[in-house]
Amino acid sequence: MSDVTSTPAPEPAAPLDFIRQIVSEDLKAGRHGRRVHTRFPPEPNGYLHIGHAKSICLNFGVASEFGGLCNLRLDDTNPTKEDVEYVDSIRTDVRWLGFDWDTREFYASDYFEQIYECALALIRRGLAYVDDLTAEQIREYRGTLTQPGRNSPFRDRPVEENVSLFERMRAGEFPDGSHVLRARIDMASPNMNMRDPTLFRIRHAHHHRTGDRWCIYPMYDFAHALSDAIEGITHSLCTLEFEDHRPLYNWIIEQFPDLPGDPQQIEFARLNLTYTVMSKRKLLELVEKGFVSGWDDPRMPTISGMRRRGYTPRAIRDFCARIGVAKNESLIDVALLEHSVREDLNRVAPRAMAVLKPLKVVIENYPEGQVEMLEAINNPEDESAGTRQVPFSREIYIEQDDFREVPPKKFFRLFPGNEVRLRYAYIIKCVSVLKNEAGEVVELRCTYDPDTRGGAAGEQRRVKGTLHWVSAPHAVRAEVRLYDRLFTTEQPGTDDARHFTEELNPNALEVLSDALVEPSLATLTAGVTCQFERLGYFCADPDGTPDRPVFNRTVTLRDSWAKIEKANG
């Protein structure tokens, strides 16, 4: 509930967007008792996605910046689509992003009795009535954008009859769809939302919190406005699709001046991201029809999917800050999100070596049975990360792509007769190539220069190519999942000629079952992201075991957004 004793902190000197400007001006003018109280009100009918992350950062961020409070309120008014699993996931995601609501976790269902009494009050004042029209008839009577609606034949029922019918609706006497409660506003209004909107409908369904106590449930517009007022919300931040609902929101608030709050609804542009969809309905379809492995599939734009893929809370918050808050819809390039992820991981992710498609190398003049422990840097961006020991032996593996029997122009990696440096180790030279019966290269024979071990002295002799590698007897076999964008088109679902699932990227996931990683990665904690040198950032997946770790590619090393910024700068 509202904490009227909270003291606002000093407001920011220069609000960064129009919402913060409004809040700043409200504080200066003394509105809302110089309080700032926001809320994040998700419906528990699916997992949160990156669009919700923008709203989370905005609502909790504004409250924090202005010394206010932010509630977590679950809009649980549709029991047929909601589940405790979704409630738990919402809590987890908000906390993982770095925000907390203290003891202010509320549910619309907390207020069902109060909302019911508000509906009765409207009926008694002649501002609501029970309608027997079917849903199809209500749509027909509502009119169009160019034609006014018509009054329902039940609009002028006596107050006492409406009260009785509404009480009987609550008692469960009527089947679903037989009656609804509608506000009595204006069927000729140019705003369709004001043409006697539905406030309550009958729904005989078990609710995850209230059980079977209710068989009538408030509509979103009615429950949301009243919940805001009950909780003393000052600034109700919504996405642009609710702009046309604002007159109804204000009408509902005005009918109940004795409630604690007088909230102000402010709309902002939702997040639209290239190569993905933000509709919960579409995301649910992807899950239910098996196009993805679940809500936390790393290809999904869900917060849980991004967490499993290795995105960090800092990166997501940074992305939300970069895109800002605007009044107009726009399409954000997913490359900007990937840029934020790379920037953060570059600073904090430890480095390691892994070979995704191994090619065996035997160093013929290296002593058999000898093993050296070489010092490797954990993170060149962070000296405090220190170093680690990496085993080196006569037999190693390199990437197949790092060798060409007939090299193209400007190929500075390994080919017959060429020298390269092994990262942290020696310079080697390819002297021969072994092939199988199919003519495929299966092994390289090389020699090494013992005077070129990694370090200041060993690096005096320079070569153009440096390769990563793993020691054959020490390498741990791993499964690596290479994720790409989920869709092949920038704006999936906008082509009416085909279903959005027809635009799914068939190459969004490639599984490499025979990758090899250095020993330090065998026990990497699930959820920890590291950089595979020269390959990209990879996150340890919960499916892995010490004997068979699994890694998800978080993002590649290539940063197209940074190049775009540099070109435009």
Image: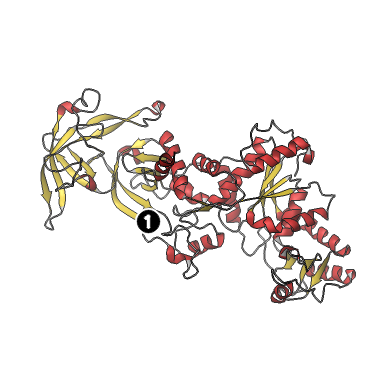
Q: Residues within 10 Å of mark 1 (few under 14, many from 20)?
A: some
Residue at the spot 81% in from the left edge and 61% down from the top edge = 119
Q: In the depicted view, which residue is nearer to us: 138 or 378?
A: 138
Q: Say which residue appears at 88% left-offset and 62% top-offset.
A: 125
Q: Quadrant of residue 446?
A: top left
Q: Nearer the viewer, residue 239 or 286?
A: 239
Vertical placement of residue 248 versus 537, above or below? below
Q: Is residue 92 visible?
A: no
Question: Could you tell me which secondary element the residue under label 1 belongs to?
Answer: strand
Q: Is residue 280 above or below residue 520?
A: below
The reply to whether residue 356 is in sight is yes
| Nearer to us in this view, 403 or 241 | 241
Q: Is residue 83 left or right of residue 494?
A: right
Which image quadrant: the C terminus? Answer: top left
Total number of numbered labels? 1
The residue identified by callout 1 is 509
Q: Amino acid at mark 1?
A: Leu
Task: Specify the farthest residue to the top.
Answer: 457
Color theme of the render? secondary structure
In the rendered image, residue 291, in percent from the top left (x then y), is placed at 44, 63
